[in-house]
Image (spheres, helix red, strand yellow):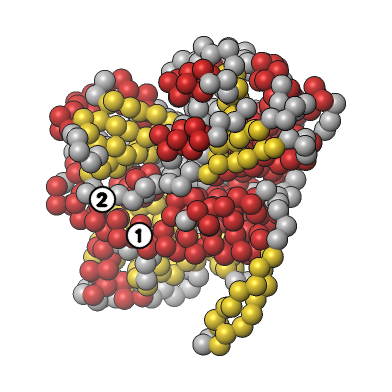
Amino acid sequence: MLFDILGTVLDNRGIKDAERFLKPSASDVIHYSNLKNIERAVELFIRHTGRNSTIVVLIDSDADGYCSGAMMVMYIRKNFPDVKVIYLLHERRENGLTKDMMEKLNKDLPDLLILPDSGTNNFEELSYLSSKGVDVIITDHHTAEGESECENVATINPQLCLDTYPNENLAAGGITYKFLQALDEHYGIRDADSYLDLVAISAIADSMTITEPETNFYVREGLKRFVNPFFKELAKKHAEWAKEIYPEIVSWNLVNRLNACIRVGDMHDKTTTFRALLGEVDTQTRISKYRGKEREVTETLQEQAVRLCENARNRQNNRKKKLIEEAEMKIAEERLDKNAFIILTLDEVPSGFSGLIAGSMTSLYYRPALVLSKEDGNDFYTGSLRGFEGHEVSEVKTFLESLELFELVAGHEGAAGLRISESNLKILNSTINSKLNFTHSEQMIPVDFEAHFRTVNEGLCRELDSIEKYFCKGFDSPLFAIKDVEIDCSDIQFKGTTKFLVNDVEYISFDINKELQSLAEEGKAVVCDVIGTIGINRYRGNECGQVKITAIDIKQVKDKPAFTFEF
């Protein structure tokens, strides 16, 4: 069976102008002057470059926050070396002007505070800082509940001016870049474009929709200029096979490791990583053990940061595995999967893990998921939501806000923080089910193609691999429904994943399928339909066709293992 893969995916994703999407150009860019308050922000910045001012840049706790914050710090250091610039990192995975951060700032108030990726809705804190004479510049993209009215606060956020800047799919890296462009023009320098790779990475990391023409252009252009020393070292270590860097590599191989460091690393890990991102030059010598023998190893700052990020990712994944096991057990016991959304409360969720677990639940149950835990000393629950691509509720944040049950729904449509009272939580499932007229039927997963398992071979995998560079949020890798896959369950590997080989193509799910594991113990064989994405897996110099499994539907269980085909 032959597929017009790219044409079908373009059509399915609603792309009308294929040429414009596949070959974005600078004509898709919206001029920075269309952003409200950007001129005011430049005026505030100018105040502090010609005098003995202290500028503090507050670094938000995710990859977009680190990228946008690093852009700002590097720009000031390079172009205004006489200005004292300090950056502050959150100790936990927190956002904006938290109580802890306000206490730090109060100890030695800066002259200018810059908030990339946060601050828009911190009205009380902004008023306080303004009253103390602190100028504040915000380069943010989150939903705005309003705008600070303080004279010495300039909020640059497209959510405040979608009539003049109709692109809400730029991450904070993109908004910070726009501010740097404005500074370039004022000072007659050309440095903003030096950080286009971080603009691209921030958009990918924050799941901005690439079908927005301007965002598409910056992602494609930025990855052509992949120069940041920390991300280059990450790619050297974890994507050494890549001839070019494209969005899927950034998502699967790079920013996941940075986010792990931000989520579970200590302050040494985070500080080292941020310094590496800034391009600072340093080396250290450490003792490494290899096969029982000790040896002295000298590392650059970037090599050290990459190692710390990988260690953090391993710790994170160990914790994540235990939490997912607990979550799946609770969902099964309480039949929580009989609802339109997965709404899960867990006793203890480490800081930064609620979104991670919610994302895993969407993949396991094919619907939006909310993961919450109870606050200490009161009757409120806090946590995170994650949406599911293809679900009937595409704008989950807006939908939840419309229920008027939450104290807080803050963030993006498919990824947001939550706060809800215990009494409202008790009626949340029934309210959502009623609103959606939900019945306990099977969840439908929209696919792009159907194919018999015999047609899924290395040739098809390589064809998908050849166009993988285009895939990103909003233009996701196509889903295939692979029919009548025949598996001898005793051939399945269960080592933290579920993995088996069919037609020399590796099928893998990044969790253990307990139903298949049970059938393997019984020596059974199955015929099933598999939904997943198709491509090439590259690892340590080896390549093989691969199906990343989204869902498995077991249609038939057989006593006799496997089937032998003669051709």
- Amino acid type at circle 1 is Arg
**Nearest to the observer: residue 130 or residue 540:** 130
Is 396 above or below relative to 44? below
Residue 518, how many percent across, how many down?
23, 69
Residue 243, how many percent across, how many down?
71, 58
Residue 438, how many percent across, how many down?
21, 31
**Nearest to the observer: residue 139 or residue 478:** 139
Q: Which residue is mark 2?
A: 348
Q: Is residue 183 left or right of residue 341?
A: right
Callout 1: helix, strand or loop?
helix
Q: Residue at x 49, y 64 (%)?
A: 311
Q: Is residue 337 left or right of residue 115?
A: left
Is 19 above or below relative to 360? above
- Which of the numbered marks, if any, corresponds to residue 150? none
Inter-mark Cα distance, 1 to 2? 12 Å
Q: Residue at x 30, y 20 (%)?
A: 402
**Nearest to the observer: residue 63 or residue 440:** 63
Q: Is residue 564 left or right of residue 208?
A: left
User: Are the residues tagged 1 and 2 within 8 Å (C-beta)?
Assistant: no
Q: Quadrant of residue 72?
A: top right
**Nearest to the observer: residue 214 or residue 474:** 214
Instruction: Residue 12: tell me if it is visible.
Output: no
Q: Residue at x 37, y 71 (%)?
A: 495
Callout 2: helix, strand or loop?
loop
**Looking at the image, is mark 1 or mark 2 earlier in the sequence?**
1
- Which of the numbered marks, if any, corresponds to residue 319? 1
Residue 554, how many percent across, how many down?
28, 58
- Amino acid type at circle 2 is Glu
Which of pointers 1 and 2 indicates the residue nearer the eye? 2
Q: Residue at x 27, y 58 (%)?
A: 325
Q: Quadrant of residue 42?
A: top right
